Image: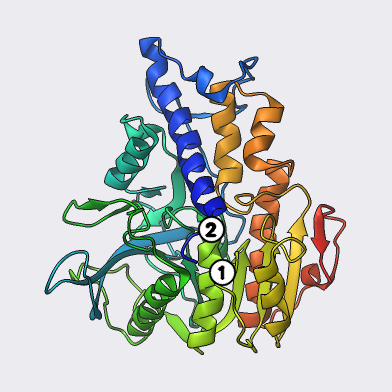
């Protein structure tokens, strides 16, 4: 199964929701409105308490700051996998990917913050929703482009990330920059032809729904990404254009401490990558459907944060669970929906305020899980998981229910 109908539909509606919100903000001076799209008509909600406002323009959507002790740096990589021909691009062409490396920074002075998405990719994202507008309302991240790496005399553990169907590598920036602020190098990737992605030469590619990619293709991208992690660890620049890397990035990564997480199809790809590649020592699935059915045993730590794709309702997820023969854990936040463990839980409530949606309409998008609590869950549980299995730092958060997170259930 390449894409579940639920996953594909969810990806489309998420894009339309955010695109509509940005369009409403940009179109307001022209007297236009898209409120009817969110029908039935709603009573306008209060504006955000502390909006970030562009000079002379409407409020920009925002992401929460990471909580770790380090500022965050980031750099984009243009990667070429010469071992895989690209039949879509034509004869003599090979698989191209755009990735980003996020890391603890030593000093961020003079280094601008990165946007949530590259400008061209963001424009394509918005056009896909039906609104071709200035992307200036898109959020900024906490990552400072090209800032020097903070190493402190030891190698840094690595986590790689795989997004969901018809999405892009920015979808879980809240988690990504949280991990980086706590000393991890996080490498995210756009799965070309199933992502909104922009290359350095200005090419912008969008999801090709006529050629759906399965999770095995995602896993193949990740295995190549692991090769690039090893290149960085060995002091080699994997960027195909040989653009300069941030000071201290080469030789900073620990290739023997690699974890992976992914959302939806990326969660399934996490399991498939681990089954095919011993380099990934621990995996985290964010509501992965585990389709097609996985029947091979996995002996390394694996954690599932489930919502819609849970063992009680989804036979493929139920089948996968007993094949986890190492450390395993399954948690579910009460009221969570498929997109609750990602940036949507932060961005869509802000969009809802722009649209004047009712609480009931908002819950149809993000469930009943409180957005502020969802952010804390995103920041705490993945960090605890990777700290335990990549750093051997044992806390108590993963031992069982916590009074700090009463909505998080531990599933037997």
Give how far across and how far down residue 294 sits, in percent.
59, 78
The residue depicted at 62 percent of the width and 24 percent of the height is 357
In the image, is residue 393 above or below residue 277? above
Colour basis: rainbow
Quadrant location of the C terminus in the rendered image: bottom right
Q: Tell me if residue 395 can be seen.
A: yes
Give how far across and how far down residue 131 sits, in percent.
35, 30
Q: How many marks?
A: 2
**Residue 378 appears left or right of 11:** right
- Whichever of labels 1 and 2 marks the residue nearer the N terminus, that label is 2
Give how far across and how far down residue 114 sits, in percent.
38, 50
Residue that numbered label 1 is attached to: 291
**Distance between mark 1 and mark 2 Cα atoms:** 8 Å
Q: Based on the displayed image, in which of its 4 quarters is residue 32 positioned?
A: top left
The residue depicted at 61 percent of the width and 34 percent of the height is 349
Marks 1 and 2 close (CB-CB < 8 Å): yes
Residue that numbered label 2 is attached to: 4
Check disc 2 and report its element: helix, strand or loop: loop
The residue depicted at 71 percent of the width and 29 percent of the height is 360
């Amino acid at each position: 199964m390449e894409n579940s109908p639920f996953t594909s539909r969810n990806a489309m509606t998420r894009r339309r929701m955010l695109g509509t919100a940005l369009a409403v903000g940009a179109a307001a001076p022209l007297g236009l409105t898209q409120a009817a799209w969110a029908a039935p008509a709603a009573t306008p909600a209060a504006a955000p308490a502390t909006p970030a406002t562009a000079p002379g323009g409407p409020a920009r959507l925002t992401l929460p700051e990471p909580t770790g002790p380090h500022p965050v740096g980031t750099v984009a990589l243009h990667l070429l996998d010469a071992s895989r021909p690209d039949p879509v691009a034509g004869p003599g062409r090979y698989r191209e990917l755009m990735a980003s490396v996020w890391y603890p920074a030593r000093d961020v002075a003079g280094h601008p913050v990165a946007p949530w998405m590259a400008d061209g990719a963001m424009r394509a994202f918005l056009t896909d929703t039906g609104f071709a507008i200035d992307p200036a309302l898109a959020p900024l991240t906490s990552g400072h482009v090209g800032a020097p790496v903070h190493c402190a005399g030891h190698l840094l553990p690595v986590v790689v990330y795989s997004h969901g169907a018809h999405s892009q590598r920015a979808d879980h920036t809240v988690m990504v920059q949280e991990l980086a602020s706590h000393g991890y190098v996080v490498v995210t990737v756009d799965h070309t032809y199933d992502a909104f992605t922009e290359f350095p030469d200005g090419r912008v590619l969008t999801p090709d729904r006529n050629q759906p990619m399965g999770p095995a293709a995602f896993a193949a991208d990740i295995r190549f990404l692991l090769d690039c992690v090893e290149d960085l660890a060995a002091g080699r620049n994997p960027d195909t254009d040989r653009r300069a890397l941030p000071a201290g990035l080469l030789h900073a990564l620990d290739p023997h401490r690699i974890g992976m997480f992914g959302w939806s199809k990326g969660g399934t790809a996490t399991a498939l990558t681990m089954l095919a590649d011993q380099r990934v020592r621990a995996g985290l699935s964010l509501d992965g459907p585990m389709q097609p059915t996985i029947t091979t045993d996995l002996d390394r730590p694996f954690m599932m944060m489930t919502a819609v794709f849970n063992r009680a309702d989804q036979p493929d997820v139920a089948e996968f669970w007993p094949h986890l023969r190492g450390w395993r854990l399954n948690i579910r936040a009460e009221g969570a929906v498929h997109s609750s463990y990602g940036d949507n839980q932060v961005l869509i409530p802000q969009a809802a305020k722009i649209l004047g949606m009712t609480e009931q309409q908002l819950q149809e998008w993000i469930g009943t899980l409180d957005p502020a609590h969802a952010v804390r869950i995103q920041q705490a549980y993945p960090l605890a998981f990777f700290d335990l299995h990549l750093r051997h730092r044992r806390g108590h958060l993963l031992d069982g229910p916590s009074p700090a997170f009463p909505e998080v259930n531990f599933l037997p």
